[in-house]
Image: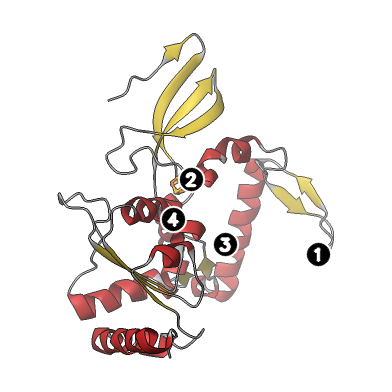
Amino acid sequence: MSKIDVRGDKRVVRSACRMCHGVCQVLVHLDGDRVVKVTGDPDSPVSRGYLCPKGAASPELLYHPDRITYPLRRVGKRGENKWERILWETALDEMAERFARIKAESGSEYVAIGQGTGRPLIEFTLRFANAFGTPNFVAPSHVRYAPRVAASKITLGQLPVTDVYGFGGQDTAGMMIWGCNITQSGSADGMCGGMIQRALKKVKKLIVVDPRRTRPAKQATHWLQLRPGTDDPRHCQGRTDRSRFCLQSYGRIRTTGRAC
Ligand code: SF4
């Protein structure tokens, strides 16, 4: 374990970044109560010192002068962008009164609750929906994560997690990157991009399916350059079709230099 510094008002504390799903373990450098810097925790067994630019910029977000840290009430017409600052108690009272009125006039199911990616907030939102009495709740997971879990369970019996870190004692030997480039986009989780970049240094065989010659495509053993939009229908049909599709595409690449 690395030492946690305490020098005068300056100290470093361990924490975790929650700017995305990655939950990278971080060291927060404080001067008094003020965060001056966030760095990756080299002793983390999971993120292993990784920190993406978003995580590194989190103190700027925390102290940005435009960050709204108090409730605002709209005073102009919708779209006029006129607001007044109100007290938390006032905001909570007004919200409670409005929710109670809607429930009394139209029933609790008249209220639908939508929220962004769950992170650590979803438990509170769901608890509120339950306490209020509405089943109408939607989050991004309903349209992307839940179907992914369901499809994995149907086809594989579980949701497999890729061991790109080599926790099982072996580095990733082969990798297929299909229709994405998380080494540069970071995917939804910047951490995954960092993991893949590290694994790419050791991988022996790399297949990239992408119309663009992305950075991984440049180092790929096989780059399957599909015409944009031609992989999705077959991709969705399951593993058997997908395997055949790969072989077909690869065959064409070998003979014509292009797939499909
Ligand atoms: S990938 Fe970046 S934003 Fe996500 S948890 Fe790690 S440091 Fe934070």
Residue that appears at 29% across and 43% down = 46
Q: In the rendered structure, which disc, 1 or 3, sits on the residue that comes first in sequence?
A: 1
Q: Earlier in the sequence, mark 3 or mark 4?
A: 3
Q: Nearer the viewer, residue 118 or 224?
A: 224
Q: Where does the C terminus fall, quadrant-wise? A: bottom left
Confirm if mark 2 falls within 8 A of ligand 1: yes
- Residue 59's spot in the image, x, y percent? 58, 35
Whether pointer 1 and pointer 4 mark residues with C-beta atoms closer than 8 Å, the reply is: no
Name the residue that disc number 4 marks: 189
Q: Earlier in the sequence, mark 1 or mark 4?
A: 1
Q: Secondary structure at mark 1?
A: loop
Q: Which residue is mark 1?
A: 79
* Apparent side of residue 15 relative to residue 149 in the rendered image (left or right): right
Label 2 – label 3 distance at C-alpha: 43 Å
Residue 7, relative to residue 168: is it above or below?
Answer: above
Task: Please name the residue that numbered disc 2 is placed on.
Answer: 52
At label 3, which amino acid type do we have?
Ala
Answer yes or no: is residue 192 visible.
yes
Instruction: Nearest to the eye among marks 1 and 2: give it.
Output: 2
| Dot 1 alpha-carbon crowd within 10 angstroms: few under 14, some 14 to 19, many 20 or more | few
Pointers 4 and 2 in contact (C-beta within 8 Å): no
Q: Decide which of tag 4 and tag 2 comes sooner along the chain.
A: 2
Residue at 79 percent across and 51 percent down: it is 83
Q: Which residue is mark 3?
A: 100
**Contact (Cβ within 8 Å) of mark 3 with mark 4:** no
Q: Is residue 136 left or right of residue 251?
A: right
In the current view of this chain or complex, which residue is farthest to the left? 169
